[in-house]
Image (cartoon, rainbow, N blue to C red):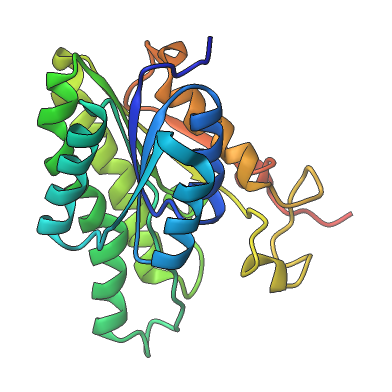
Amino acid sequence: MGRVDDKVVLIAGGARNIGEASARVLVAEGAKVVIGDLLDDEGKALALDLGKAARYIRLDVTSEEDWKNAVELATREFGKLNVLFNNAGIFNLSSIQRYKREQWQQMLDICLTGPFLGIKAATDSIIAAGGGSIINTSSIDGLRGTAYAHGYIAAKFGLRGLTKSVAMELAPHGVRVNSIHPGRISTPATDAMPADMIPIPLGRPGRPEEVASFVLFLASDESSFATGAEFVVDGGTVQQIPTRA
């Protein structure tokens, strides 16, 4: 038996990187998945590759209508919704003096309001399924400050807080809500960065599959007593205080 047999999972930002790795491991462990993204070609190709256990839907996380449609697709195609994985996100940088309000708002819209709208849209269906799990991708930048990443930091700290308030509200309904805090994860974008830009005690970036293993755990009943918690996947980065020999 798989670790998530008979569970239905909606993944926002599911077409590539952590989202793709999570979709693959969830299906391999018995789940049905709905992949939501704006990357239509990649999302459709992934769903086709995963077969009858997967569907793709175009999902702009800032659109309440898109969220409604994604939840309805999950329940129509697979009969219910057990798990929401809020994984969509963007990143931008600028000095505080030059950080445009439009940059700030875009970051909050996608990385904080998007998960809020997803939780709002999915909660009734998850409760109707008998409870389940909501998983939010924050970041180690939801635990610390980083220069120039002002909107990203604010959104990821906000998502960390939203995770906790929703966890307390939904606990009586059997819905667990937790956040994952990845550090540097190897993707085409991050692989272009200097290797020593972020010192990592374990000596390397993480792999999307390593984050996906936490998603699998939190989607499964193995995490049945975890809610409102933070799961850090960063090779020790946030624990390190740089020192000189």
Residue found farthest to the bottom: 98
Q: Quadrant of the C terminus?
A: bottom right
Q: Is residue 86 above or below residue 216?
A: below
Q: Position of residue 189 (x, y in %)?
A: 61, 70
| Side of 132 relative to 173 (left or right) | right
User: Which residue appears at 68% of the width and 47% of the height?
Assistant: 206
How many numbered discs? 0
| Side of 176 relative to 143 (left or right) | left
Q: Is residue 206 above or below residue 4?
A: below
Q: Position of residue 6 (x, y in %)?
A: 36, 17
Would you say residue 39 is visible in this rendering? no
Determine the image quadrant of residue 152.
bottom left
Q: Nearer the viewer, residue 130 or 179?
A: 130
User: Which residue appears at 23% of the width and 65% of the height?
Assistant: 109
Q: Position of residue 156 (x, y in %)?
A: 37, 54
Q: Position of residue 104 (x, y in %)?
A: 29, 75
Q: Nearer the viewer, residue 5 or 196?
A: 5
| Side of 171 relative to 110 (left or right) | left
Q: Nearer the viewer, residue 185 or 144?
A: 185
User: Which residue appears at 63% of the width and 53% of the height?
Assistant: 185
Determine the image quadrant of residue 134.
top left
Q: Is residue 33 above or below residue 44?
A: above
User: Which residue appears at 31% of the width and 80% of the height?
Assistant: 103
Would you say residue 187 is visible in this rendering? yes
